Image (spheres, rainbow, N blue to C red):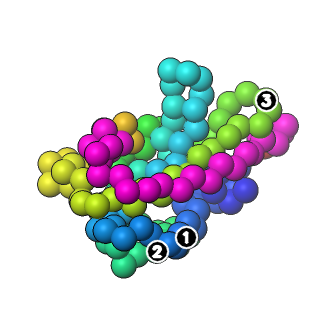
Amino acid sequence: MAQTCDGRGEPPAINWSGAPQGTVSFAVTMHTQVNIFVSHAYLVVYDLPKSVHGLPTNSRNIGIFGSNSINDRREYAPPSSRGPGMKDYVVTVFALNSVPKVTAQKQGVTRQELLSSFSHMTLDSATLKTSYARPTNP
């Protein structure tokens, strides 16, 4: 899987369509839920204009990147999950009726801060779950 640390570590291409009426902007996140209390955020992007309907592979110039929780940088962090077995990764696209207020306040926003900032602005969302197991001997 090219998007993981076992591959090229490149941000995935993500495309969407069918935004609800009233959409002003989009936000996109990618995370894994480690346990009930802990999640890891690999991608946090917001302030995507309503004219945008996707993020191409290696996209870095569309929207504003928030901080991933792996290295706290404003960029995509490729998953490098520890331990055996399948890991689930969740990509969510949010259609918003406004631009999150964090845009003007803080560019290094975390996934949780972003979700909290637009909970009342979300018109709809779509989620894709994918699974990946690291090779036994990477």
Q: For mark 2, does the 10 Å Cα neighbourhood hold few (<14), some (14 to 19), or many (20 or more) residues?
A: some
Would residue 43 be found to the left or right of residue 133 on screen? left
Q: Residue at x 58, y 32 (%)?
A: 33
Residue 135 at what x, y percent from top left?
Answer: 82, 42
> Residue furthest toward the right?
136
Q: Are marks 3 and 1 in contact (CB under 8 Å)?
A: no
Instruction: Tell me the CA gap for discs 1 and 2.
Output: 6 Å
The numbered disc on residue 63 is none
Would residue 121 be found to the left or right of residue 111 on screen? left
Which region is colored magenta? 114-137
Residue 3 at what x, y percent from top left?
Answer: 63, 56
Q: Which residue is mark 3?
A: 84
Which one is nearer the viewer's eye here, 78 or 20?
Answer: 20
Which one is nearer the viewer's eye here, 6 or 67?
Answer: 67
Q: Amino acid at mark 2?
A: His
Q: Amino acid at mark 3?
A: Pro
Say if residue 63 shows up in the picture.
no
Residue 106 at what x, y percent from top left?
Answer: 20, 47
Residue 55 sits above or below residue 108 on the image: below
Which one is nearer the viewer's eye here, 94 or 71?
Answer: 94
Q: Are marks 1 and 2 in contact (CB under 8 Å)?
A: yes
Q: Give SS at disc 1.
A: strand
Residue 5 sits above or below residue 3 on the image: above
Instruction: Tell me the CA gap for discs 3 and 1.
Output: 30 Å
Label 3 vs label 1, nearer the camera = 1
Q: Residue at x 37, y 57 (%)?
A: 123
- In the rendered image, residue 123 lying in the magenta stretch gets the answer yes
- The image quadrant where one finds the C terminus is top right
Q: Which residue is mark 2?
A: 53
